[in-house]
């Protein structure tokens, strides 16, 4: 009689431990195992993520204005309060992003519960580099940028996947809190799609 209870307790402990870890696996498919067609399918999902407000609001290219867009913002508009990121991309020339987007404790899960408060992550909040210009860009434009080593920080698909896993801003984008809509799919699925797209030779719709 006691045995099933013990099993239930062990299983319960196991899932509690799993829930706390955000372990993401970076396992590229075997060379030659992804067709160009499947690579393009993976790309179309990557494009849905990159074009989503939780990503694109910060990836605004040569504009030094972050954007406010997505359901919780109503109309699409530049960040309120005349925020400008400047060449530093952190607002050092004007008003620093970190004045409001303060750094959260890495273990503090409820940091973003309050709707319309400035999002907080466990690293410095800043605008993405000029080259990673995604807001309002087409699938062809973003695809061309992400596979161009001169404009993607010299990264292979595996490097991009590693970057995605280490960037704590991204962990926020998939669980933003405060009623904000998360980026589509999951971090793991997005990483899998980047890896499959890479093994297929980084095909783009315009090829
Ligand atoms: C004066 C305070 C303040 C400063 C300084 C500030 N922000 Fe914000 N930011 C906010 C607030 C508040 C929100 C959330 C508004 C809402 O949800 O209605 C926000 C939201 C954002 C969003 C939207 C996030 C999402 O939901 O997708 C981005 C992107 C952003 N800020 C980027 C920046 C960047 C980059 C800087 C520095 C150049 C910066 N902010 C400086 C207060 C600030
Ligand atoms: C708070 C602003 C912010 C948000 C939101 C954001 N990024 Fe970024 N992104 C950055 C910054 C800053 C860098 C540069 C970091 C570096 O190179 O170490 C970057 C770099 C990148 C890069 C590598 C550089 C390149 O050329 O592509 C990728 C890939 C990326 N982001 C993907 C995403 C995805 C996917 C999302 C949404 C799930 C996202 N980002 C949301 C700020 C942001």
Image (tube, grey):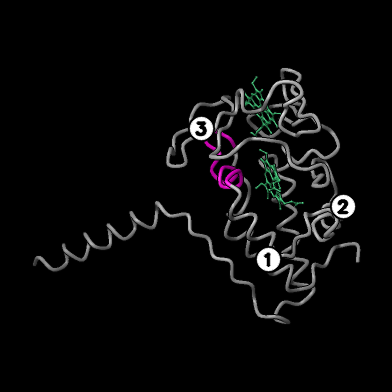
**Region rendered in magenta:** 168-180
Residue 127 sits in quarter: top right
Distance from Cα at disc 1 to Cα at disc 3: 30 Å
Q: Earlier in the sequence, mark 1 or mark 3?
A: 3
Mark 1, residues whose alpha carbon is within 10 Å: few (<14), some, or many (≥20)? Answer: some
Q: Does 35 appear above or below 186?
A: below
**Residue occupying the point 81% across, 61% down:** 147
Q: Are marks 2 and 3 in contact (CB under 8 Å)?
A: no
Element type at mark 1: helix
Location of the C terminus by quadrant is: bottom right
Judging by the rendered image, the residue that carries numbered circle 3 is: 112
* Earlier residue among tags 2 and 3: 3
Inter-mark Cα distance, 2 to 3: 32 Å
User: Closest to the observer: 204 or 167?
Assistant: 167
For the question of whether residue 57 can be seen, the reply is no
How dense is the environment of label 2, judged by Cα within 10 Å: few (below 14), some, or many (20 and up)? some
Toward the viewer: 132 or 179? Answer: 132
Q: Which residue is mark 1?
A: 158
Determine crowd level at label 3: few under 14, some 14-19, many 20+ residues with C-alpha closer than 10 A: many
State whether residue 192 is above or below residue 199: above
Q: Quadrant of the N terminus?
A: bottom left
Instruction: Answer left or right for 145 relative to 177.
Output: right
Q: Secondary structure at mark 2?
A: helix
Residue 176 in picture, x, y percent from top left: 56, 39
Expressed as whole percent of the image width and height from the top left, the position of residue 57 reads: 72, 37
Residue at which label 2 appears: 141
Q: Give the distance between the C-alpha atoms of the residues marked 2 and 1, in whole angstroms.
A: 21 Å
């Amino acid at each position: 009689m006691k045995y099933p209870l013990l099993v239930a307790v062990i299983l319960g402990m196991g899932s509690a431990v799993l829930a706390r870890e955000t372990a993401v696996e970076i396992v590229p498919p075997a060379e030659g195992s992804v067709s160009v067609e499947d690579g393009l399918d993976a790309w179309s999902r990557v494009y849905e993520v990159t074009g989503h407000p939780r990503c694109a609001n910060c990836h605004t290219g040569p504009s030094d204005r972050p954007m406010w867009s997505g359901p919780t913002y109503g109309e699409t508009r530049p960040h309120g309060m005349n925020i400008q990121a400047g060449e530093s991309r952190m607002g050092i020339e004007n008003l620093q992003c970190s004045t409001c987007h303060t750094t959260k404790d890495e273990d503090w899960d409820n940091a973003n519960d309050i709707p319309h408060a400035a999002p907080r992550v466990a690293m410095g909040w800043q605008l993405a580099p000029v080259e990673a210009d995604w807001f309002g860009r087409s699938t062809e434009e973003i695809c061309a940028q992400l596979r161009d080593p001169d404009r993607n920080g010299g990264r292979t698909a595996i490097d991009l996947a590693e970057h995605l896993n280490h960037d704590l801003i991204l962990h926020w984008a998939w669980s933003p809190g405060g009623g904000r809509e998360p980026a589509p799919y999951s971090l793991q699925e997005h990483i899998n799609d980047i890896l499959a797209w890479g093994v297929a030779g980084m095909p783009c719709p315009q090829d």
